[in-house]
């Protein structure tokens, strides 16, 4: 059942991402999906002040890389920018919320999803300009990333780890 849920999430994410735009800017719901998987794969038990490696980082990075690979293949561009970007988002998402670095709050969720969206835009645009002959207008790219970050903000509020503490 768990695999069916994630396959349907992936399908719906790509469906919404390709069918909708906001102010004629493409959306990046795949960033939200990688972030959501990272939050859901967080270990449920923590020990006071200790970092615990549970393999969640690798699972989340692999899931993000898989989403990025699908996005690269479906976009018809060079394979690699989205793979690297979404894999990095999956890895950082788990590492940042292990309660050793940060404890989840709605404001931190907003900041994180905005930073992940900006990181995704910078990595994808940068790698495409480096490894292909595409010339990228920095102002237009910044506007698109800004709009994408605004659209992703509600997901930063809504999505949260299963077990989180707002205070000590």
Image (tube, rainbow, N blue to C red):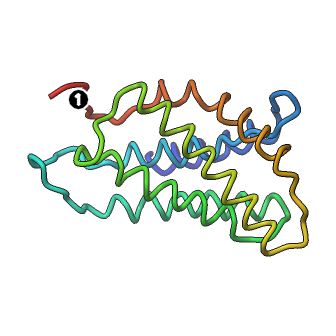
In the figure, is residue 21 to the left or right of 148? right
Q: Quadrant of the C terminus?
A: top left
Q: Quadrant of the N terminus?
A: top left
In the figure, is residue 123 to the left or right of 98? right
- Which residue is at the front of the view, 89 or 66? 89
- Which residue is at the front of the view, 104 or 63? 104
- Which residue is at the front of the view, 157 or 64? 157
Residue position for label 1: 165
Instruction: Rate crowding at label 1 as few (under 14), some (14 to 19) or many (20 or more) other CA atoms within 10 Å.
Output: few
Residue shown at 34%/58% (left/top)?
56
Question: Quarter of the image holding residue 72?
Answer: bottom right
Residue farthest along the front direction in this orientation: 139
Residue shown at 79%/66% (left/top)?
128
Residue shown at 65%/40% (left/top)?
29
Where residue 81 appears, as percent x and y from the top left, is 69, 65
Looking at the image, residue 108 lies above or below residue 79:
above
Secondary structure under badge 1?
loop
Where residue 92 appears, as percent x and y from the top left, is 43, 55
Where residue 98 appears, as percent x and y from the top left, is 27, 48
Residue shown at 85%/64% (left/top)?
76
Where residue 9 appears, as percent x and y from the top left, is 59, 42
- Which residue is at the front of the view, 76 or 48? 48
Residue farthest along the left direction in this orientation: 48
How many numbered badges does the structure rendering display? 1
Looking at the image, residue 141 lies above or below residue 90:
above
Looking at the image, residue 10 lies above or below residue 113:
below
């Amino acid at each position: 059942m768990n695999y069916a849920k994630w396959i349907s999430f992936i399908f719906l994410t790509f469906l919404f991402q390709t069918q909708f735009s906001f102010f004629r800017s493409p959306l990046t719901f795949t960033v939200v999906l990688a972030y959501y998987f990272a939050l859901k794969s967080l270990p449920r038990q923590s020990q006071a002040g200790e970092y615990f490696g549970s393999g969640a980082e690798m699972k989340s990075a692999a899931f993000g890389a898989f989403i990025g690979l699908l996005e690269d293949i479906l976009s018809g561009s060079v394979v690699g920018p989205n793979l690297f970007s979404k894999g990095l988002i999956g890895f950082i998402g788990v590492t940042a919320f292990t309660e050793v670095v940060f404890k989840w709050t709605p404001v931190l969720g907003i900041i994180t999803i905005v930073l992940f969206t900006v990181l995704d835009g910078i990595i994808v645009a940068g790698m495409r300009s480096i490894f292909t002959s595409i010339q990228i207008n920095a102002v237009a790219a910044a506007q698109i990333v800004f709009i994408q970050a605004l659209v992703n903000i509600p997901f930063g509020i809504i999505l949260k780890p299963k077990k989180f503490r707002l205070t000590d």
